[in-house]
Image (cartoon, helix red, strand yellow):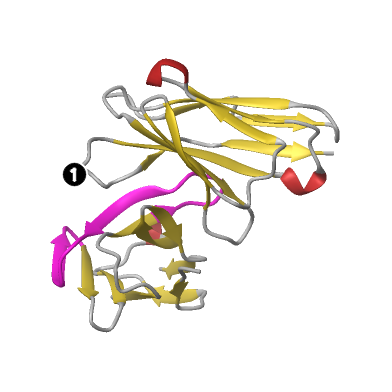
Amino acid sequence: QKEVEQNSGPLSVPEGAIASLNCTYSDRGSQSFFWYRQYSGKSPELIMSIYSNGDKEDGRFTAQLNKASQYVSLLIRDSQPSDSATYLCAVRYGKLTFGQGTILTVHP
Amino acid sequence: DTGVSQNPRHKITKRGQNVTFRCDPISEHNRLYWYRQTLGQGPEFLTYFQNEAQLEKSRLLSDRFSAERPKGSFSTLEIQRTEQGDSAMYLCASRGGARSYEQYFGPGTRLTVT
């Protein structure tokens, strides 16, 4: 059973702070990793993909991948109330396997 | 570039009835996926098409569920003899070519079985 685990939430950060979301996965063979944002009642929206070890930055978002530790994270800098959502980590084992999600709340 | 579309957006049905959902992928995407999501959980894979061929089906998918993708364009997901446990959000996602791994989701169909 290939598994994806996310840090349990909910996570609450003040506006302007850095939010850190973490994810571990069980299968060393996986090559592709994704972060999705899901607002309440809506479908998942792809915000980051990462395939190689290291950091990948896109605006206020940075994805970090460490294949040796089987760990992927998402940092959100200068968090805004509009970032409040559930963040889903997904790992590609052929199809996508998702973690259970971490609820992030950014309070003014 | 239009995104993935799904219809209907909401469906309420009585236990025992059959329901069918439709997904129209992004036009140039040849790979199409169906997922199911319940409250507080991540999406769970149901089935996968490459063009018109159904290449993978979850072992969790009972024989009451069937999916098709005629002509490799839109796809339908049918649930026969619905049960209350089928209540969930049904999500469709599409992906481009062999080297493009990003999946883009449609708005989903929320099914409520009473």
Image position, residue A18 (x, y; %):
28, 75
Q: Report the magenta residues as a range.
A: A37-60
Q: Reply yes or no: does residue A41 show up in magenta.
A: yes
Residue pictured at 30% horizontal, 22% vertical: B27
Q: Chain of mark 1?
A: B
Where is residue B78 shown, x and y percent of the image? 65, 28
**At 26% across and 35% down in the image, what residue appears?**
B96
Q: Secondary structure at mark 1?
A: loop
Rendered view: B57 above or below A55: above
Res B53 quadrant in image = top left
Q: Residue B55 is drawn in which quadrant?
A: top left
Q: Give the residue type at disc 1.
A: Arg
Give the residue furthest to the top: B71
Q: Does residue A17 show up?
A: no
* Residue beneath disc 1: B99
How many marks the image carries: the answer is: 1
Q: Is residue A82 visible?
A: yes
Viewer-side residue, B36 vs A46: B36
In which quadrant of the rendered view does residue B81 lie?
top right
